[in-house]
Amino acid sequence: MARRYDSRTTIFSPEGRLYQVEYAMEAISHAGVAVGILGTDGIVLAAEKKITSKLLEPGSSEKMYKVADHIACAVAGITADANILVNSARLSAQRHNFQYQEDIPVEQLLQSICDIKQGYTQYGGLRPFGVSFLFAGWDEHHGFQLYQSDPSGNYGGWKATAIGANNQSAQSILKQDYKADLTLSDAVGLAVKVLSKTMDSTTLTGEKLEVAVLYRENDEVVYRLLRDAEVDKKITELDLATPAEST
Amino acid sequence: MAGKNCVGIASDRRYGQYQTTIATDAQKIWKIHDKLYIGLSGLATDVQTFIEKLKFRITLYQLREERDIKPSCFAQLVSTMLYEKRFGPYFVEPVIAGLEGPNNEPYLCAMDLLGCTSTAKGFVVGGTPSEQLYGV
């Protein structure tokens, strides 16, 4: 029944749904999970790497991207689609910077990306982007901010959230364990713990994760991808290496 | 000017209009990254705009390539950007100094306002008194 209303992105179904947008979100639910947590002194973005082959050239990231000096993002979904939007985000940030000689406020950048995503649900007859983002950034107006955006072009500000596979279980763990006074270091620990509980793989190592932090030092925003060894250290500290007893 | 595995770059700090000096703290040299500097002399408004456009391009380069731009590559970028305005140019004369490659080889390059590059080993100059700076 729904099939008759699938083929064009730019029309509603009789029940008032946009099927192509929903199908895009379905695609994302198969992608590696990404978690974001807002700490008092920084933000952590942690993600599960789906492609972990020994043959893979190290150094390039499939989940984390720096968008500007003060904004970074984690991706869940079709990487090729994500690349287009990350590039748009980078250009948008630089255009703002060129025009106003200031860092683009995080929410403004979000809006410009989300407006692009929304356009693909209303105009052109092209499919929507199969990507959800977690954007982490700092600006002088609102401090540290964490945002989530989806293929429909909706976005929201969060204290802690997750996208990708098993994001509901990740979100429920975050709901229980998130506290408002988490430091960045605590947040990293919580993020790794949440990933260990929601990832399908049995053993957890730094190789399978990408963990990035965004914080301020000497009046400048710093974005850093943790090295595998640092992530492994956090895993051992929290004693997450061995799989939990299954019920 | 180049030394052994090092380069130096210097400029005056005057901003004036004809004979009137308006400022004595003008910035004419910018750091692109740890091993690359550019000096821009000429019409102040074009210097300002051109460096802002350069920062735009360099930031994107760094984000996409995840590395610092090579001095020779940067010089080519500057040259291309200037030539794009061949029939309505930016009135700037860039001087580029950097260290290139694993051995930190000095890289020096000067350009005219249309982007014609001249690379040299010892020293490069730019600006109104460039003839006097050459010393010929």
Image (spheres, coloured by chain):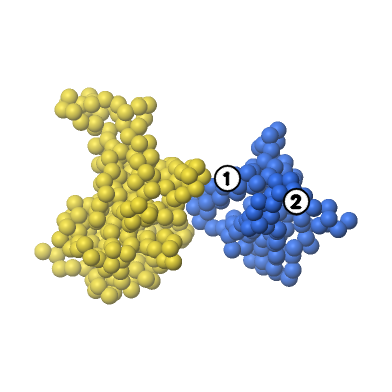
Q: Which residue is rendered at x = 64% and y = 43% of the image?
A: B46
**Chain for numbered disc 2:** B
Q: Quadrant of residue A242?
A: bottom left
Residue A195: horizontal and vertical position, in percent? 26, 61
Q: Which residue is rendered at x = 14% and y = 65% of the image?
A: A246
Image mark for residue B127: 2
| Viewer-nearest of discs 2 and 1 | 2
| Closer to us: B59 or A241 | B59
Q: Which residue is mark 1?
A: B53
As helix, strand or loop, the secondary structure at mark 2 comes to: loop
Mark toward the start of the polypeptide (2 vs 1): 1
Chain B hue?
blue
Residue B83: horizontal and vertical position, in percent? 69, 39
**Residue kind at label 1, given as amino acid type:** Lys
**Residue kind at label 2, given as amino acid type:** Gly
Per the model, the C-alpha gap separating discs 2 and 1 is 20 Å
Q: Which residue is rendered at x = 74% and y = 45% of the image?
A: B18
Image mark for residue A223: none
Residue A67: horizontal and vertical position, in percent? 43, 51
Residue B25: horizontal and vertical position, in percent? 63, 58
Most extreme residue toward the front is B20
Q: Are marks 2 and 1 on the same chain?
A: yes
B60 with respect to B83 (left or right): left
| Closer to us: B108 or B102 | B108
Most extreme residue toward the left is A247
